[in-house]
Image (tube, rainbow, N blue to C red):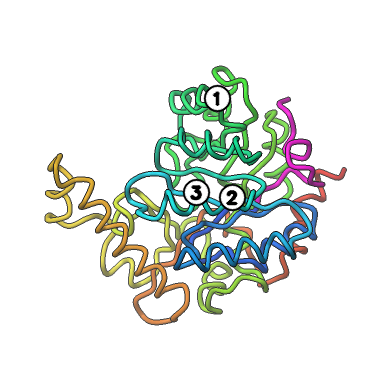
Amino acid sequence: MSKSLTEILGIKYPIIMAPMFLVSNKEMLIAAAKAGITGAIPALNWRTLEELEAGVKHLKEHCPGPFGINLIVNKSNPKYKAQLKIITDLKVDYIITSLGNPKETIELAHKNGVKVFCDVTDEKYAKKVEQLGADAVIAVNNQAGGHAGHLGPEELISKLQSTCNIPIISAGGIGNGAEFAKMLQLGVAGCSIGSVFIATEESGVTPEYKQACVEYGADDIVFTTKLSGTPCTVINTDYVKQIGTKQNALERLLNKNKQLKKWAKMVTFVRGMKSLQKAAFSATYKTVWCAGPSIEHVNNIRPVADIVNDLTSSYEQ
């Protein structure tokens, strides 16, 4: 087995409460730490750089355990460099990188004693970030919520174990203690678990969003490219069925043009994120709610600590 996440971060259970756009908040991270795991939050969950700085300072003061910040490190995030400086200056415990080259992030983070875990979906990219100095890889499989990978959990873990020498954290498809234990038996350092924490008392999204996670299941999760330009899993509500899940002709044309592609993706990303923001905090007919198949195991709205207890009961045994 690779070095455990419990040893890497000094936590009781090897679980990261995955960073979820517009869902993760300070209260959830504090509750996660109190329950013996660690949580991460997307930097973009704070609208301004000032709010990001204040939020991290609040967590540094009130979170009783390690916490992380998820950072989008490609050009679709114009705030990337400023966000990186703030979170490394304040010395968060770890950074999770997504959607880009993490070289600059790893270099600056390590200068400030901050660990870096990189989202990967295949062995080629995993080897690249290992060579750049990543402290661990987060193996995003095809059961993950949000921007999922294309390989199943077992296949992806096996491929990474044969090519990488740094810890592997499995992400996707974990909704109960049995699934958590199964991943650990494959030899991973820990697991990143997100969707089952949406319907928690500490979560700040609407009651309707939480209730959707209770009422819908794995068969109701579909991929859409309308939100960010990259396939993203959402709950297949009536509104999603109405608008479809594929980009229209204009969006496809823009993405085929090499000069316009990066700008088209940025526009699609911004438009999509605004749609998600509205869905997260304003219950209307036009709802687009991100989630993964593991909501199959969500039966009611509970405290974060209760979910952690259920996930870790098998681990304790």
For this rendering, which residue is in front, 156 or 166?
A: 166
For badge 1, the amino acid type reads Leu
Q: Position of residue 173 (x, y in %)?
A: 57, 47
Examine the image and state in which quarter residue 115 appears.
Answer: top right
Element type at marker 2?
Answer: helix
Of pointers 1 and 2, the one earlier in the residue sequence = 2
**Residue 14 colored in magenta in the image:** yes
Q: Which mark is residue 84?
A: 3
Q: Position of residue 124 (x, y in %)?
A: 44, 23
For this rendering, which residue is in front, 67 or 143?
A: 67
**Residue 38 colored in magenta in the image:** no
> Horizontal placement of 264 versus 221: left or right?
left
Mark 1 Cα within 10 Å, few/some/many (few <14, many 20+)?
A: many
Q: Which mark is residue 160?
A: 1
Of pointers 3 and 2, the one earlier in the residue sequence = 3
For badge 2, the amino acid type reads Asp
Looking at the picture, does residue 182 appear above or below residue 221?
Answer: above
Q: Which mark is residue 89?
A: 2
Locate the N terminus and report the quarter of the image it occupies. top right
Residues tagged 1 and 2 counted as in contact (Cβ below 8 A)? no
Q: Which contiguous range is marked in magenta?
A: 1-16
